[in-house]
Structure formats: structure tokens, C-alpha cells
Image (cartoon, rainbow, N blue to C red):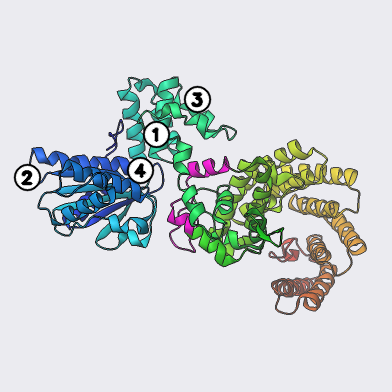
């Protein structure tokens, strides 16, 4: 039975749950991912029962602790117990027979016993070796990474053991460092940050505390190392920090289930799916990401090929296979998902350990596949699915931070720009500006100042300035961006046309009506000449020019343009398209404005307020 770790946290709520189940005559299975402290809690519960012998009559007569990763280990432990109990007929040369004799003895004895099955990996194979505690004199306590329904049947209670609560993580770090004589290394202001970076994982916190003690590093120094994505977990949580004798590095412990997954996964998709999931935001990503066409296409070539007539064959991947592989990963606690349609979560350290197993040459393709999946799920209008849009933003930012420059080469992935639009749609204008400023810097560093993607990033930043009401900054940057577009890509490039249109909007926002009007007349003429009369950009440019005519008091010209925009929308998009409805509403309001002008006395000039364009006319 393992000794209790230094600064052991009692996990009182879980302990009370287990004690309650025992008093009801139910065996208990502690289930949880690697490193959450299942064996430590089981050892604490076992000691608690054992030590009752000294104070009450309810103590234990027999305590067996057996490793349960395979039947052979259990058989050996049971046979040894039969020998120590001197059971009649126990033959140490016949371990199987002695083990079965021990099981029969447990079912019949009046003595009080506890059997702990630690790290159970195959519930079906071990079913015949599960002791019968029906007499009420004994109890079975098991630990496992799995959550099979079988584990909660036949009088058993499955209790999920998760991460430390934040107060437990803080208490552990403080006590561990203090007991080691290094209380000065405990920084209350940074302890929460350290626990957060390590995901409140007990095993990782134990290794990190030992690392601090061994190296005398401060928490801020360690956090800097931990946040450096080029650092490997084996360096940050090294074997030398295994002061509790767990017997394996943190990385190996986190991924211990992978071999079992590979054996159980008939689809051969679990490992490549785990690679993709490890690039996503730990707090959750949509499960539907992995049934998008981009993901299915990637998975087809990512899983091992089959042999067909002496050639390598990659059969198509089905959504059913993806769901089966995800179920396998859930069963072995490598991912967490409350329901099959709920977001998929992956512990941050597990994700980091998985990423370190991805061959370097495969990372860019995996990153762009994940980005394709994110982009394909983005709702057409963020306000219709705000939670989904927020989750996609978080995942896109996290993916880029982890894999940069994968999403920027050979060209910038559209999900990079989509984040900016989504922040603006959510009304998060300052966040949009900060994001666009970073995007422009990254693009400049990766592509150079004159690359079209860098121009697009700077154009987005100008638009964000405008959306946030920072008109002069939008105007100044917009003029520079347009000049660069004209210099680098020429007057007729689509990007140049967009930059010209955006600058016109900034002129309008700044009250420079005539400059906006002149620029929009040029934009419309360019669109008609280059893209044709019916191109969506041309229709938008025509509508924007109508706005500028209204701004300038040229009501009749605005009315004529709006009539044409509506006719075009009806002809191209149909009567019921949202853009057609908007155009119809804009025309109605333009007609009202024109009628109001006609009713004004010729001696009383129309005021600017009388001639305002429709407030909802799109730019």
C-alpha cells in the first residue's frame, strides 16, 4: 500500500461519499484521470479502516492491496493472501487455485476484510476476481481511469475523483513548501496562477513543488518556464521531482491509457483525434468539429492505412467511426464530455503531453485542419448562436497561440480574421482592437510589411478603430492602408477597392461628407468596371453611395440609386432574402425623406436632420 504523499489533502467530500456507500453495503470504485490522486485517497481510506482496529471493534482483520492492471497481478496477490492466512488446501504452486480459494473464504468468513484493487484497467476480465462482499463483513475499493457502466453495477458505487479545488491546491503548495523548510518559496500572490497553469492536477502540483524545493526557484520564475511552449513537460516536471515514489514521470502517467486505447480502438482514429483535440482550448470545444468535412478528410490520411492488393489504401472516415473513437477516449478518461453532444474538454497538461507526441512534421497540417473545422462551424450571424461564437473565438485564439506560424503560412487562415469580426459583432470593441493590433504585428513579423495579408490585417484594425468610435485613428490608418494597397497591388485590386470603400466610411464618420462622396463614386465605378453590375460588392457600393448622396442632401439621386438596389436585390436574391428586405426598407425611408423635402417651403432650406439617410442602411 503506498505511503501517503507529503501535504496530503483529505478530499473530505469524496471520502464522505465513499464512507456512506460502505455503510450501505456497497463497494466503491474511484474513477478519474491520471494524476488526480485515486491511489492516494484509496490508501488513506484503507488506513482509516485499518486503524479503527485500535479504537473500536470495527477494524480490519484482513487487508489486501492488489495492483489490478491485469488478472495475473490480482491472482498473485490473492494467492499470497491465502498463504499468509494458512487456508487449508492453498497450494502456492497453484496460484490460480489458491486465489479462488481465497475468494471463497472472503465470501464465507465472519472476519472483517478490505480488498483494494488499484488501477483496474479491464473490468470485464476482472469480473470473476471481484470479491463477494454480500455478507456485510467485507468491502471492495477499486481505483480506475475508466467509467464503464459495468463498474457501477452489481452493488457498486462509481465515484468520480477530479482535480483539486483551488483552496486544496493552495493548501497543498503552502504546506508542502513549508514542511520542506522553504516557506519563503510560497508566493500567495502567485500560488493561484501556478495551480491554474497546472490545471489543479495533484500529481503535477506535487512534482512542481518538489522542483521548486530542489532548484530553489521562485514561483514567478517557474511560471515563466511553464508558460514557454517550447519547454517540455519532462524538463518542467522531471523524474527527479518524483519525491513520493509514484514511479513514473508526469507525462507517462497522463498518457498511460493511450496503449489501452490503441488496443480497444477498432477505428484507429482515437490517437489522431486526440492529436487534434490537444490543440483546442482546454475548457471545451464543439464535438461537431471532428465530423466536419475538413476533419474527416484529415483523419482519412492520419490513421494507419490498410493493405489492399499490395497497395496502401485510405478508406473514407465516417461520422460513426469518429463517435466510436471519441467514446473510447472518454472511456479511458483522456477526454471529458458530459453528453455525446456536449463540448469536449481535455486537461491542459494532458493536452500538452499529447502535443509533445505529435511528430513535428505533422503539426502544421493538424493545426490547419483544426482551424478549418473551427471556421466551418462559425455561425453566419454571431448573435444567433452567441455561446458557440464565443467558444470558437477562444479555440481559434488558443490554436494560433500554440501553433504559430502554422495558421499564417503559406497564407493567413481565415479564422484569424473571423475572430476580429466576431468580437465586433459581440460588441467587444476594445478586445477587437487589441486582437487586431496583435494580428497586424504577427503578420508584419511573419509576412513582412508589404504582404497582402499584412495589409488586410491593418485594414481590419482601421475598421475596429472605427467601430469603437476612434474616428481619427481609423482615418489616419485607413489613408495609409489605401496608399500601400495602391502602391503594392495597384488601383484595381479587390483589396484596394475594399480599402477605398473603408476609407470612405471613415470620411463619413468624421463628417467629411464631400470626400466620402467623391471616393464612393469612384468605388462604385471601379466595381462596375472590374466586377460587373451584379457582383455583391457592386450592389453594396451602390447602396453606400446612396448613403453619401443622402448625407450631401442629394435626396433625388439617393432615391434613384435605392430603387435600383432594390430591383437588383429582388432579381438576384429573390423577394424574401434578408438583403432584399433591408433594401426595401431603405427605399421606403428614402421616399419618406424625398416627400418631406418636397413639402418644405422653398424659402426654408432643408436641414441636415431632415435629410439623414436611413439609420439602418448597411455600409
Residue furthest right as drawn = 529
Image-based side of 141 in relation to 293, left or right: left
**Image spot of residue 289 (x, y percent):** 59, 59
Residue 165 marker? 4
Q: Nearer the viewer, mark 1 or mark 4?
A: 1
Q: Secondary structure at mark 4?
A: loop
* Residue extent of the magenta highlight: 328-357
The reply to whether callout 1 and callout 3 are in contact (CB within 8 Å) is no
N-term-proximal mark, 1 vs 4: 4
Q: Quadrant of the N terminus?
A: top left
Magenta-drawn stretch, dominant element (helix, strand or loop): loop
Disc 3 designates what residue? 221
Q: Who is closer to the viewer here, 217 or 487? A: 217
Disc 2 designates what residue? 57
Q: Residue at x 57, y 54 (%)?
A: 273
Q: Nearer the viewer, mark 2 or mark 4?
A: 2
Image-based side of 134 in relation to 257, left or right: left
N-term-proximal mark, 2 vs 4: 2
Amino acid at each position: 500500500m503506498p505511503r501517503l504523499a507529503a501535504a496530503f489533502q483529505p478530499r473530505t467530500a469524496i471520502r464522505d461519499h465513499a464512507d456512506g456507500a460502505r455503510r450501505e453495503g456497497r463497494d466503491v470504485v474511484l474513477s478519474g484521470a491520471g494524476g488526480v490522486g485515486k491511489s492516494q485517497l484509496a490508501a488513506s481510506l484503507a488506513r482509516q479502516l485499518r486503524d479503527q482496529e485500535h479504537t473500536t471493534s470495527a477494524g480490519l482483520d484482513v487487508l489486501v492491496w492488489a495492483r489490478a492492471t491485469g488478472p495475473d497481478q490480482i491472482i498473485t496477490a490473492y494467492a499470497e493472501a491465502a498463504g499468509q492466512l494458512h487456508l487449508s488446501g492453498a497450494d502456492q504452486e497453484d496460484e490460480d487455485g489458491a486465489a479462488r480459494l481465497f475468494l471463497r473464504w472472503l465470501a464465507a468468513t465472519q472476519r472483517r476484510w478490505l480488498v483494494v484493487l488499484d488501477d483496474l484497467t479491464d473490468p470485464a476480465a476482472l469480473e470473476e476476481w471481484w470479491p463477494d462482499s454480500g455478507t456485510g463483513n467485507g468491502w471492495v475499493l477499486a481505483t480506475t481511469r475508466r467509467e464503464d457502466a459495468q463498474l457501477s453495477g452489481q452493488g457498486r458505487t462509481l465515484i468520480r475523483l477530479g482535480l483539486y479545488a483551488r483552496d486544496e491546491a493552495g493548501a497543498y503548495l503552502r504546506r508542502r513548501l513549508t514542511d520542506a523548510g522553504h516557506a519563503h518559496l510560497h508566493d500567495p500572490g502567485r500560488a493561484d496562477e501556478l495551480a491554474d497553469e497546472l490545471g489543479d492536477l495533484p500529481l503535477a502540483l506535487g512534482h512542481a513543488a518538489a522542483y521548486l524545493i530542489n532548484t530553489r526557484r521562485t514561483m514567478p520564475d517557474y511560471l515563466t518556464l511553464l508558460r514557454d511552449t517550447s519547454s517540455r513537460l519532462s524538463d518542467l516536471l522531471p523524474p527527479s521531482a518524483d519525491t513520493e515514489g509514484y514511479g513514473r514521470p508526469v507525462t507517462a502517467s497522463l498518457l498511460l491509457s493511450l496503449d489501452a486505447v490503441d488496443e480497444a480502438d477498432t477505428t484507429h482514429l482515437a490517437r489522431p483525434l486526440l492529436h487534434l483535440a490537444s490543440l483546442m482550448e482546454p475548457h471545451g470545444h464543439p464535438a461537431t468539429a471532428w465530423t466536419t468535412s475538413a476533419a474527416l478528410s484529415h483523419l482519412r490520411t492520419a490513421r494507419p492505412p490498410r493493405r489492399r492488393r499490395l497497395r496502401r489504401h485510405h478508406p473514407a472516415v465516417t461520422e460513426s467511426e469518429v463517435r466510436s473513437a471519441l467514446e473510447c477516449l472518454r472511456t479511458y478518461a483522456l477526454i471529458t464530455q458530459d453528453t455525446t453532444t456536449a463540448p469536449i474538454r481535455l486537461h491542459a497538461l494532458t493536452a500538452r503531453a499529447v502535443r509533445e507526441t505529435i511528430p513535428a512534421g505533422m503539426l502544421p497540417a493538424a493545426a490547419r485542419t483544426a482551424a478549418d473545422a473551427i471556421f466551418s462551424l462559425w455561425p453566419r450571424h454571431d448573435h444567433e448562436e452567441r455561446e458557440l461564437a464565443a467558444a470558437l473565438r477562444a479555440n481559434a485564439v488558443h490554436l494560433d497561440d500554440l501553433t504559430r506560424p502554422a495558421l499564417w503560412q503559406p497564407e493567413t487562415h481565415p479564422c484569424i480574421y473571423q475572430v476580429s469580426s466576431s468580437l465586433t459583432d459581440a460588441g467587444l470593441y476594445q478586445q477587437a482592437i487589441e486582437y487586431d493590433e496583435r494580428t497586424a504585428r504577427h503578420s508584419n513579423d511573419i509576412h513582412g510589411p508589404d504582404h497582402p495579408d499584412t495589409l488586410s490585417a491593418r485594414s481590419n484594425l482601421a475598421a475596429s478603430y472605427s467601430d469603437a468610435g476612434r474616428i481619427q485613428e481609423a482615418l489616419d490608418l485607413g489613408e495609409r492602408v489605401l496608399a500601400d494597397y495602391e502602391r503594392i497591388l495597384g488601383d484595381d485590386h479587390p483589396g484596394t477597392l475594399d480599402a477605398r470603400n473603408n476609407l470612405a466610411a471613415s470620411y463619413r464618420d468624421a463628417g467629411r461628407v464631400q470626400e466620402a462622396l467623391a471616393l464612393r463614386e469612384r468605388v462604385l465605378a471601379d466595381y462596375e468596371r472590374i466586377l460587373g453590375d451584379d457582383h455583391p460588392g457592386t450592389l453594396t457600393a451602390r447602396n453606400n453611395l446612396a448613403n453619401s448622396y443622402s448625407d450631401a442632401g442629394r435626396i433625388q439621386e439617393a432615391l434613384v440609386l435605392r430603387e435600383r438596389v432594390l430591383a437588383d436585390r429582388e432579381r438576384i436574391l429573390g423577394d424574401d432574402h434578408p438583403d432584399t428586405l433591408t433594401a426595401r426598407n431603405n427605399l421606403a425611408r428614402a421616399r419618406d425623406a424625398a416627400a418631406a423635402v418636397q413639402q418644405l417651403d422653398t424659402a426654408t432650406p432643408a436641414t441636415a436632420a431632415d435629410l439623414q439617410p436611413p439609420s439602418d442602411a448597411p455600409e
